[in-house]
Image (cartoon, helix red, strand yellow):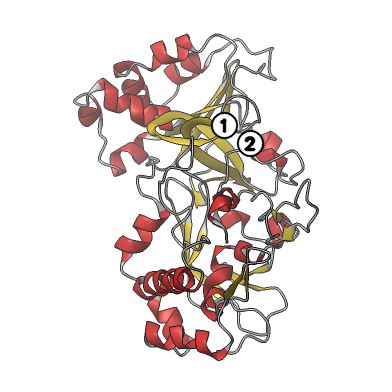
Amino acid sequence: MKSIHILTFCLVFFTLASCRKKEFMPEVEGQPVPHPEMTASLKDVLNTSPYTIFKAAWERSNMDKIIKEKGERASYTMLVPTNDAFIADGLTMEKINSIEPALLDSILLYHTLTGTFNPEDEKGRADNYPGKSLLQNPFLRVKAPFSGSALAAPYFYLQYLKVSGNELFVNGKKAGAGAAVLAKNGVILPVSRVLHKPTKTILQVLQEDGRFGMYLDLTARTDALFAELTYGNFQHDFTAGLKVSEMGDFNITFHSIFAITDDAFRKAGYNTVDEMMELNNRNPLPYVDWDTYAVKGGLVTDTLVGYHRWGTFFSHDEPNAGRGTANVTNFYSNDLNNTVLGDYTLVLGGFPTPFPAYKMPLDFNNEGGVIKVKVKGSDYPAASVIESDINTIMGPVHVVDRLLLPKDFKL
C-alpha cells in the first residue's frame, strides 16, 4: 500500500451519497421539528418530569445559555438518565450540587444530541441512528463531510441509537425502556444508565487490555518485514486509523475492529509470534515491480489477520491510483447482522480510473444471543464475539475467540 494512499483508511461521520447507508448522516441542527402542534419546550417537559437529578444538573450548568445561543429553530434529543441511574453511578443530588458547572456542561452536552430521534418513527429501522452530541473535543478534527473549501470539521462525540421492541439501545448496549416524551423542540428519552464519553483510541484499548499482545506483536513485525522488502516506499501500517495522527487537516478516522485474543491464536495452533511469522516463508515474498511502481505478492500473515479489520486490505489496489474511498466501519454489535451489512460496500469503486468496489466479505449469524462471524464461503468455524462494544473515540472494539480465515487458507 502506497503512503500517498493513506486516505484509503479515512472515514467520516457521514457516508457518501452513493453509499447504501446514507442514513449515517446525523440530523441537521436547526431543522424544523415535525410536531408543530406541540407547545411545551424540552425545558418545560424536563421541569415537570421525575428526573430531578438531571434537572438539578441542568440548572447548575450553563446549558440554558448554550441552548439559547443555538437559536430557536434547533431541535434536540435529550438522553436523560433516571434518578436511579445517576445514584448507581455515584452522582447523587449532593454530588451534583458540588460539581463545577463546566464539568456538568460536559456531562449534559454528551447526553444532548442534535435533531429529533422519535422511537415511534425509528422502530422499523434496521441499523443504528448516528446521533451527534453537542460535546466537542477541541483537540480532534475529522475529515470534512462535504467537498468544498473546508478540509476538516470539528469532532463531536456520537451516540448510536436503536429501538428493538420497546428497548432503547445506545452504542450497542441496552439503555432502558422508558417512554419518550415529545416536545416542540425535540424529545426526551429516559435512559437507565449514565453515558460516559470514550477517552481512548482503539490502539490504546488493545495495548492496555492485556489480551492482545500476540496480535499487536504480529502486526508490528509484519509491518517491519513489509517495509524491509519494499525499501520503505509503500505504506503498511497496522496502527493507521487506530490512533490519533496528523493526516493533513484532520487527525482521526472512524473504525471498528474484531480484536484477536492470545487464546484465539493458541486455538489456531500458534503459541508464539515466531511460529506465525514463519508462515511468510511458504510463499514467495512480496517485491517491488519498479516498472509499474507496485508491490507484487503479499504476506501470509496479512491474510491471517486481515479480515479482522473488515478485509479492506484486500480491496483492489490500482497501480498509480491506489484504492477507492473507504466507507464507514464503526459498527456496534446490533449492526453486526446480514440485514444491515450483508451487501455493504466497504470500499467504493475508483473514479476516474475504473476498478471494482469492495463488498462486505464477512457473514454474520446469531446463535442463542451470541454473535457469530466468519469469512463468506469459509470452511473454518465462525468466531464468537465474546465481548462487544468496547467504546473508543473512533468506534467500538469487538473481541473474538477465533481467527477469521478465508476458504482454503492453510494454518
Q: Is residue 321 left or right of residue 411?
A: right
Total numbered labels: 2
The residue mark sitting in front, 1 or 2, is 2
The kind of residue on which mark 1 rests is Ala
Q: Residues within 10 Å of mark 2 (few under 14, many from 20)?
A: many
The kind of residue on which mark 2 rests is Pro
Could you tell me which quadrant the C terminus lies in? bottom right
Tell which of 163 and 61 is nearer to you.
61
- Outermost residue toward the right in this view: 354
- In the rendered image of this protein, does residue 194 appear above or below residue 305? above
- In the rendered image of this protein, does residue 113 appear above or below residue 267? above
Report whether residue 236 is seen.
yes
State the image coordinates of residue 95 (x, y, percent, origin top left). Answer: 21, 31
For image coordinates 60% across by 15% down, the residue present is 184
Tell which of 145 and 370 is nearer to you.
145
Report whether residue 330 is seen.
no
Tell which of 10 and 360 is nearer to you.
10
* Residue receiving disc 2: 119
State the image coordinates of residue 107 (x, y, percent, origin top left). Answer: 35, 31
For image coordinates 70% across by 49% down, the residue present is 126
- Outermost residue toward the front in this view: 291
- What is the secondary structure assignment of the residue under circle 2? helix
* Residue receiving disc 1: 180
**In the rendered structure, which disc, 1 or 2, sits on the residue that comes first in sequence?**
2
Do labels 1 and 2 touch, CB within 8 Å? yes
State the image coordinates of residue 67 (x, y, percent, origin top left). Answer: 46, 15
For image coordinates 76% across by 53% down, the residue present is 349
